[in-house]
Amino acid sequence: MIRTLQLAAATFRPRRAVPGQDLFSPSVTRMRVHLSDLDLYRHVNNGIYLQCMDVARSNYLADLGAFGALNERGWYPVVAAQTIKYRRSLTWRQRFEVTTSVLGWDERVVYLDQSFSRRGRDGEPEHVARGIVAGRFLGRKGERVAAPDVVALLAGEPVSPPELPADVAAWARAVDVAAR
């Protein structure tokens, strides 16, 4: 429930835009593990990671100052597909960060990297998990919005997509979200 409230706050009362932030700038969301995030094995439940990713994506849009322009057009984001790989556990009260970055886009979706990290015992960042997300935008009546149109809005001008990393392109084809 806490993460749902956090997502509502990030969406309906977004944080301020970051001066100089552009489409390819990473967005960092800092969080702490709550008791309600834990499963019976006393580490963060796998579903909570996905909720944290939702919050971080809303913060990414907020950092760009995008909510006003998206709302004017009636466009909103949805997840078309996602995958996550866990490397380390997060436990109660640990602080962690989710870094959201755009990898690229095609005619249908925008591909995002969402990486979880925490401070290790030596004070250095430790990789915890990595999620790849294929995100779409829909209009008020459920119509699909082309990813290049969304990117142009967020960037302030039309932008050519970078080449997707090979593993992400292969995943997009395998889960059938890539442009046909």
Image (cartoon, rainbow, N blue to C red):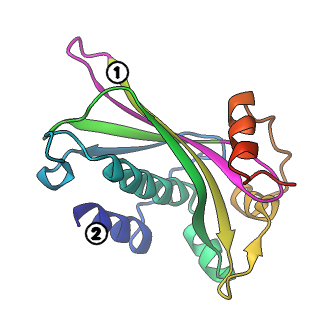
The residue most toward the bottom is: 141
Q: Quadrant of residue 2?
A: bottom left
Return the residue nearer the eye: 50 or 96: 50
| Amino acid carrying mark 1 in the image | Pro
Residue 108 image position (x, y, % from top left): 78, 59
The residue most toward the top is: 122
Q: Is residue 107 at least partly visible in the picture?
A: yes
**Does 113 sit left or right of 97 as displayed?**
right
Magenta includes 53? no
Q: Which residues are magenta?
A: 103-124
Mark 1 Cα within 10 Å, few/some/many (few <14, many 20+)? Answer: some
Badge 2 is on which residue? 5
Quadrant showing the N terminus? bottom left
**Does 172 sit left or right of 30 as displayed?**
right
| Residue located 21% across and 51% down the image | 37
Identify the disc placed on residue 35. Answer: none
Residue 110 image position (x, y, % from top left): 69, 52
For numbered disc 2, what is the local secondary structure? helix
Magenta includes 114? yes
Identify the disc placed on residue 125. Answer: 1
